[in-house]
Amino acid sequence: MLMVASTALLTGVGGAGLAQAEPAVPPALASLFDTGSAALGSSEAPAPDAPRLASIDNFRDVAGTGAGYATADGAHVNKGVFYRANAIVPNEADMATLTALDLSTVYDLRTDDEVASKKDMLPADVTYKRIPILSGNINEMLGKINAPDDARKMMQDMNVAFVSGAVEKAKFAELFTDLANTDGGGQVFHCTAGKDRTGWTSAVLLTLAGVDQKTIMDDYLLTNEYAKDSIAKNTAGLKASFGDKYVNFIPLVTVEESFLQAGLDEMTATYGTMDKYLTDGLGLSADTIAKLKAKLVG
């Protein structure tokens, strides 16, 4: 999601001296944006859970753990198909683990500045594609944060823009089209912190698969658990950068239910259903949507 040094805070969202023109985003915020399972009843054992990676702490399977998230028709979301993550800069052990997953493609949703500050390091033969999703003047937005609720409003507005922003719609259309049409091994999509842009992408896929909204929200909130060490580090960085005012920026380095809900509410109000959002909002074809569903639950 969005993250903490100008683009880094919003791109992982921050920077010291918010009162100055074009301040550098604080390192804490820069890290933010820097701001198939067997069918129900089958005798086959479920695919292994995605490994926990110490150096990529928000790496996880979109399908969840165990048998995979249950769907409305009694099936389960296929594991090992789509993975979500924060910036992919693995240590030696985690690189070996990623290599063993036999991934096909990594989609990097970060901006140019985010990528420049922390470039992905991928296993050999994995295709890397950038689809930057983030618009607006980060410093201008950060300069308006004077209380925690200002930061919450910023994150809510970001999720609304994922649904209705012209730039965001075009980029998400490209991403979902590629996810549907790329064959081979598992596909990974990620931003800086793996929570906002990545969180919306995952929520769309799980909704399309027929997973209930409570489970989708619970999955979204797992960032606070998976990335708790990164959140603690970012919080310490905020204290160092902003002193007592650091609390105003805490919502930028975590996830809250209202963030994702703002996007879901915008989708419902504007399009009615997720399928209509994908067809009318993003311009996806029925064939592309069918391919996505087949990958998720087929």
Image (tube, rainbow, N blue to C red):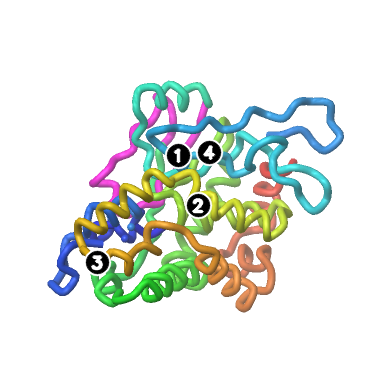
The residue that disc 4 covers is 187
Asked if the residue at tag 1 contacts the one at tag 4, i.e. Cβ–Cβ closer than 8 Å, the answer is: yes
Of circles 1 and 3, the one toward us is 3
Please tell me whether mark 3 sits on a helix, a strand or a loop: helix
Asked if the residue at tag 3 contacts the one at tag 2, i.e. Cβ–Cβ closer than 8 Å, the answer is: no
Magenta-highlighted residues: 102-127
Please report whichever mark, 1 or 2, sits nearer to the chain's N-terminal start: 1
**Residue at (54, 49) in percent of width and height:** 222
**Residue at (49, 50) in percent of width and height:** 223
Of circles 3 and 4, the one toward us is 3
> What kind of residue is marked 1?
Val
x and y percent of residue 82 in the render? 57, 41
Q: Residues within 10 Å of mark 4 (few under 14, many from 20)?
A: many
Q: How far is mark 2 from mark 3, CA to CA?
A: 40 Å
Taking the view exactly as shown, the residue that stands out farthest to the left is 20
Please report whichever mark, 4 or 2, sits nearer to the chain's N-terminal start: 2
Relative vertical location of residue 173 with respect to residue 273 in this rendering, above or below? above
The residue that disc 3 covers is 244
Residue 34 visible in the picture: no
